[in-house]
Image (spheres, rainbow, N blue to C red):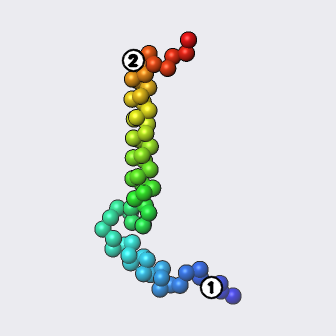
């Protein structure tokens, strides 16, 4: 007894051809891969730099100290 595949062979073959012929990096070939590979890390880095800068400013001016 053989089990039916989840996706037809023609669709798998078409997707394989698309991904093999795309002229992008492997991790950026999908539709939403740019968001997860580039957007989220850039947003995290920007927010981290902002918070570090604000903390240094507050420390240098003595803002936010508890008495």
Q: Residue at x 39, y 17 (%)?
A: 60
> In the rendered view, would you say 60 is above or below 36?
above
Circles 2 and 1: CB atoms closer than 8 Å: no
5 on left or right of 34: right
> In the rendered view, would you say 51 is above or below 42?
above
Residue 10 position within the rendered picture, expressed as x and y whole percent measured from the top left: 47, 86
3 on left or right of 47: right
Q: Nearer the viewer, residue 30 or 61?
A: 61
Q: Around disc 1, counting alpha carbons within 10 Å, would you say few (fewer than 14), some (14 to 19), or many (20 or more)? A: few
Of callouts 2 and 1, the N-terminal one: 1
Q: Residue at x 39, y 23 (%)?
A: 57
Q: Around disc 2, counting alpha carbons within 10 Å, would you say few (fewer than 14), some (14 to 19), or many (20 or more)? A: few
Residue named by callout 2: 60
Question: In the orientation shown, which residue stands out farthest toward the top?
Answer: 67
Where residue 14 sits, quadrant-wise, is bottom left
Q: Nearer the viewer, residue 31 or 65?
A: 65
Q: Residue at x 55, y 81 (%)?
A: 7
Residue named by callout 1: 4
Residue 63 position within the rendered picture, expressed as x and y whole percent measured from the top left: 45, 19
Residue 36 position within the rendered picture, expressed as x and y whole percent measured from the top left: 45, 56
Question: In the orientation shown, which residue stands out farthest toward the left?
Answer: 23
Q: Residue at x 39, y 46 (%)?
A: 42
Tag in front: 2 or 1:
2
Distance from Cα at disc 2 to Cα at disc 1: 67 Å
Q: Quadrant of the C terminus?
A: top right
Residue 25 position within the rendered picture, expressed as x and y whole percent measured from the top left: 35, 61
């Amino acid at each position: 007894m053989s089990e039916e595949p989840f996706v037809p062979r023609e669709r798998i073959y078409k997707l394989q051809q698309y991904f093999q012929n795309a002229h992008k990096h492997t991790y950026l070939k999908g539709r939403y891969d740019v968001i997860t590979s580039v957007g989220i890390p850039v947003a995290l880095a920007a927010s981290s730099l902002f918070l570090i800068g604000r903390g240094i400013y507050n420390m240098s001016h003595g803002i936010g100290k508890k008495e």
